[in-house]
Image (cartoon, rainbow, N blue to C red):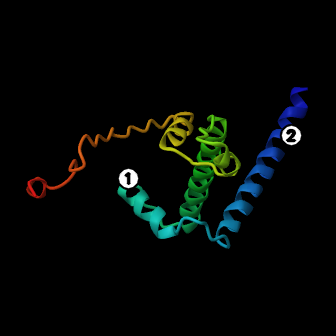
Amino acid sequence: MNGQTSHQQPKDRHDDDATLTEFLASLMDYTPTIPDELVEHYLAKSGFQCPDTRLTRLVAVATQKFIADVATDALQQCKARPAVIKDKRDKQQKEKRLILTMEDLSKALREYGVNVKHQEYFADTPSAGLDPASRDE
């Protein structure tokens, strides 16, 4: 058995290398949703610089996939949440309309190891959040 495995391993590696080379070449013809300039900006901001456009596009595709997965999971969280129905007239409309909340998004991101902390907002009075000079008026 070991003799067969050793003969197959170099062939499998060659197939993997060929597949990777083909995939990287296909990235040159692909225009990702996230622009190259934006990806390059954040890569440079994190201290990474690479002149190879294929690598930039690979990061863009991976980012796009991550965002799509998070959005799908957040939608599932939203659908799992019980809908609040005020009266029977709104019942039909509420069944069709989903409202994605920050809580849904936070739960979805938590599954990927991203913890979102959002501030609590308090509006005790109508003038809360206004400039102190305008409160006296």
Residue at 86%, 40% (x, y): give it: 8
Q: Is residue 103 left or right of residue 68?
A: left
* Residue 107, quarter of picture: top right
Q: Is residue 9 left or right of residue 93?
A: right
* Residue 81, quarter of picture: top right
Q: Amino acid at mark 1?
A: Ser
Residue 109: where, in percent of width, then height?
Answer: 53, 39
Sequence order check: which comes first, mark 1 or mark 2?
2
Q: Mark number for residue 8? A: 2
Which of discs 1 and 2 lies nearer the camera? The answer is: 1
**In the depicted structure, whether residue 113 falls above or below residue 59:** above
Tell me the SS state at disc 2: helix
Q: Is residue 36 left or right of residue 58?
A: left
Mark 1, residue position? 46
Q: Residue furthest bottom?
A: 29
Q: Residue furthest front?
A: 88
**In the depicted structure, whether residue 137 falls above or below residue 87:** below
Residue 122: where, in percent of width, then height?
Answer: 29, 40
